Image (spheres, rainbow, N blue to C red):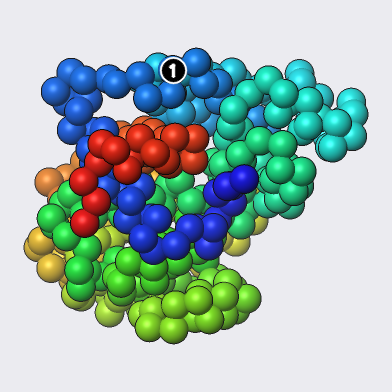
Amino acid sequence: MRHLLTLFDLTTDELNTILTTACYLKRDLRQGLRPPILARYTLALLFEKPSLRTRVSFETGMTQLGGNSLFLGEDVGWGKRESPSDFTKVLGQFVDVVACRAKSHDCVEQLASFDAVPVINSLTDLSHPCQAIADVMTIQEAFGSLDGKHLVFVGDGNNVSRSLALACAMLGLRFTLACPEGYELDDEWLTRIAKRYPKSQIRQVTDPKLAVKDADAIYTDVWTSMGQEAESKVRRKAFADYQLNDELMAAAPPTARVLHCLPAVRGEEITDSVIDGPQSDVINQAGNRMHAQKALLVFLLRPEWIVENVTLE
């Protein structure tokens, strides 16, 4: 049984297959085509955290594929009313796939460990693979190719930047994290990437202007993520010089594209002039969450459809 807990669960060829399928499904949708690839399949959305993009993109995407989705919040008693084993195995009797948005990565690992139903990590404190797939899809659309591209993340070594660093290693992009000292990517994650992808090009710097000077895409995220609220004052001070603003954009090539996974704290990690500016792909990036996740669902549940219908290079 296949799961997607991190991008380490995919090969490079499989990631490229998902990207190609996402572009195929997006093109079909623009032409008014909504093939019922997952008719009568059911997706359960098991969420511990609030969501806009993740929930709506999964629910809408599943509907467009001809399937159904169920939102499971705190009322289902996950981890409270019954053993994790009973909960997961019973859930596997009812649904075909689970997308889990959890506070701890251990939770999605526990769900997947019973092999009762395919599990998709739709966000944990460790990783955000669905976001990263949509992000590299957006870069590919912007430039026509990912070959030789340089993605710069201005922020901290959080779940999003971890997933992006891995995606870049898989697909041959350069990745740079610009962050204050003490907020780097963790060594364990970097070691895993280097072992699997020894040709990966990942670096970490403290000077954001140096980082973006040859960037193709510049990405930022909130300085304080959910669960880090107690650190907000310290983080605002630490990241004060890492705002994605007009001054920082002036240090980058004029062709550089701007990305943000949203929600944004406007005026903090990014200014209105940048997120709403002509170099921003933020809205298209958000929209690509649905197309990427549709492709992922098809890949996990009906891979034969991809083989029969999508031209893979």
Residue 270 visible (yes or no): no
Instruction: List the single residue furthest toward the bottom.
Output: 198
Q: Judge from the rendering whether residue 105 lies leftward or rightward of residue 307; answer left or right.
A: right
Q: Position of residue 44 (x, y in %)?
A: 60, 25
Residue most toward the right?
82
- In the rendered image, which residue does mark 1 sit on? 39
Q: Quadrant of the N terminus?
A: top right
> Is residue 54 positioned above or below 201 on the image?
above
Q: Residue at x 39, y 71 (%)?
A: 169
Q: Residue at left 28%, top 61%? A: 218
Q: Which of 93/4 is in front?
A: 93
Q: Is residue 146 left or right of residue 119?
A: left
In this view, the residue in front, 232 or 289, is 289
Viewed as shown, does residue 126 lie left or right of 81?
Answer: left
The x, y position of residue 251, in whole percent, is 18, 71
Residue 212 screen position, x and y as percent: 25, 71
Q: Can you tell which quarter of the image residue 305 is in?
A: top left
Nearer-the-camera pick, 242 or 25: 25
**Residue at x-position 22% and y-position 63%:** 146
Q: Amino acid at mark 1?
A: Ala
Residue 40 in picture, x, y percent from top left: 50, 15
Which residue is found at the position 10% from the left and 61% from the top? 255
Q: Is residue 253 above or below residue 310?
A: below
